[in-house]
């Protein structure tokens, strides 16, 4: 079981997103996602998130919120625990990212982008300022076949 982080970095009504278009083998190929990645040995969720955001953007976050745990189960990519965060940051020049293209986008436009179907569920929870949650998303290929929020099927 992999441990990963994902952070939605906002500036007002915009959010910094990564369009994953540069890697040949990428479970997120052609999708828009927040910032984050895999834990390194000995890292806490916060340490991993802060490192990944800095590596991908050059932004050093000074405040953030740990919002939930998303359990992904995939018949193609295995399983992972994703630790979900939100943060605020000032907009600045964006560096080249070896995983895709970084872009500030309106928060309310995200669900119209090519994203995972399950991402729409946790984006809604973030938008509603839901308390800390546990969300399980089970995929067959790219198809979401099960969603369970705090132990209850959706």
Image (tube, helix red, strand yellow):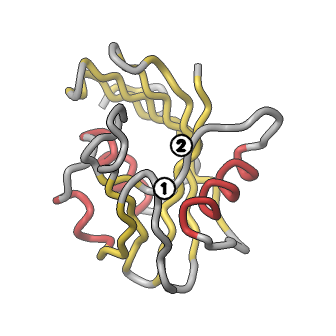
Residue plotted at (37% across, 75% down): 104
**As drawn, is 36 to the left or to the right of 98?**
right
> Dot 2: within a 10 Å radius of its alpha carbon, few (fewer than 14), some, or many (20 or more) residues?
some
How much space separates mark 1 and mark 2, taking CA atoms?
Answer: 7 Å
Measured from the top left, where is residue 85 in percent x and y?
Answer: 57, 55
| Quadrant of res 142 | top left
Q: Quadrant of the C terminus?
A: top left
Residue plotted at (37% across, 56% down): 100
Residue plotted at (69% across, 72% down): 60
> Dot 1: within a 10 Å radius of its alpha carbon, few (fewer than 14), some, or many (20 or more) residues?
few
Q: Is residue 146 above or below residue 64?
A: above
Measured from the top left, where is residue 51 in percent x and y?
Answer: 69, 56
Measured from the top left, where is residue 117 in percent x and y?
Answer: 24, 40
Task: Tell me the SS state at disc 1.
Answer: loop
Residue bearing the label numbered 2: 133
| Quadrant of res 105 | bottom left
Name the outermost residue toward the right: 42
Measured from the top left, where is residue 77 in percent x and y?
Answer: 40, 21
Looking at the image, do the residues carrying marks 1 and 2 touch, with CB atoms under 8 Å apart? Answer: yes
Task: Tell me the SS state at disc 2.
Answer: strand
Q: Pick the residue in front: 123 or 140.
A: 140
Q: Is residue 91 above or below residue 17?
A: below
Q: Pick the residue in front: 146 or 143.
A: 143
**As drawn, is 1 to the left or to the right of 73?**
right
Residue bearing the label numbered 1: 130
Q: Pick the residue in front: 139 or 56.
A: 56
């Amino acid at each position: 079981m992999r441990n990963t982080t994902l952070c939605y970095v906002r500036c007002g009504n915009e959010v910094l997103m990564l369009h994953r278009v540069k890697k040949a083998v990428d479970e997120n190929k052609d999708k828009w996602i927040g910032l984050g990645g895999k834990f390194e040995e000995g890292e806490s969720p916060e340490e991993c998130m802060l490192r990944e955001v800095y590596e991908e953007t050059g932004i050093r976050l000074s405040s953030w919120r740990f919002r939930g745990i998303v359990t992904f189960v995939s018949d193609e990519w295995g399983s992972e625990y994703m630790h979900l965060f939100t943060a605020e940051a000032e907009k600045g020049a964006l560096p080249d990212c070896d995983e895709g293209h970084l872009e500030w986008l309106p928060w309310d436009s995200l669900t119209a982008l090519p994203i995972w179907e399950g991402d729409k569920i946790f984006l809604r929870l973030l938008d509603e300022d839901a308390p800390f949650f546990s969300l399980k998303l089970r995929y067959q290929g790219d198809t979401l076949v099960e969603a369970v929020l705090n132990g209850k099927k959706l």
